[in-house]
Amino acid sequence: MSEGHHNVYVVQLAPEVWEKEARFRRANPGYSGKKPCVYVGMSGLSPEERFAKHRKGEKANRYVTRYGIKLLPELYAFANPMPYEAAREMEVELAIGLREEGYAVWQA
């Protein structure tokens, strides 16, 4: 299998996402508030390019468009790049792992 060019990425979200978005809160019932709220995604673009598109509202997740602060490469850089299927799986695994570590996570 080739190395691939897909990437997973994690975006830190502003705390207001927790305060203002009931759906986000429902997805994270065990959240303690000690770690940031984050969005986990995957893309064929670099994390920086994909985050810029989210911020512009292009094929964007509304939580990232409204509340995205910055990328958190320390949480995902170890995995990139990878083939498409591996990135799809890693997106889910990363979201689950971060939630287990205490993050409030949105993963579409």
Image: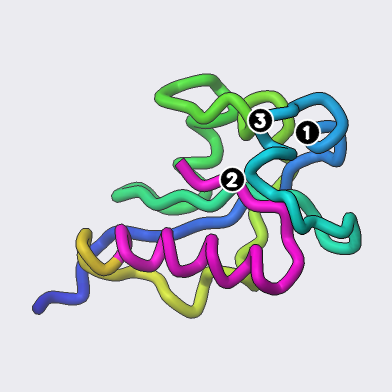
Question: In the image, what residue occupies the spot 26% across and 68% down?
Answer: 86
Kindly indicate the quadrant of the structure image that contains residue 32: bottom right
The disc, 1 or 3, on the residue closer to the chain's N-terminal end is 1
Query: Was residue 15 drawn as part of the magenta stretch in this picture?
Result: no
Q: Position of residue 108 (x, y in %)?
A: 45, 41
Q: Position of residue 74 (x, y in %)?
A: 65, 72
Kindly indicate the quadrant of the structure image that contains residue 27: top right
Disc assigned to residue 23? 3
Question: Which callout, 3 or 2, points to the residue nearer the camera?
Answer: 3
Give how far apart the Cα atoms at labels 1 and 2 are.
Answer: 10 Å
Give how far apart the Cα atoms at labels 3 and 2 are.
Answer: 10 Å
Disc assigned to residue 2? none
Span highlighted in magenta in the image: 87-108
* Contact (Cβ within 8 Å) of mark 3 with mark 2: no
Give how far apart the Cα atoms at labels 1 and 3 are.
Answer: 10 Å
The one of 16 and 33 positioned closer to us in this rendering: 33
Q: Within 10 angstroms of label 2, few (less than 14), some, or many (20 or more) residues?
A: many
Q: Amino acid at mark 2?
A: Trp
Q: Amino acid at mark 1?
A: Val
Q: Amino acid at mark 3?
A: Arg
Question: Which callout, 1 or 3, points to the residue nearer the camera?
Answer: 3
Disc assigned to residue 106? 2
The disc, 3 or 2, on the residue closer to the chain's N-terminal end is 3
**Residue occupied by mark 1:** 17
Please name the colour scheme applied to the rendered image: rainbow
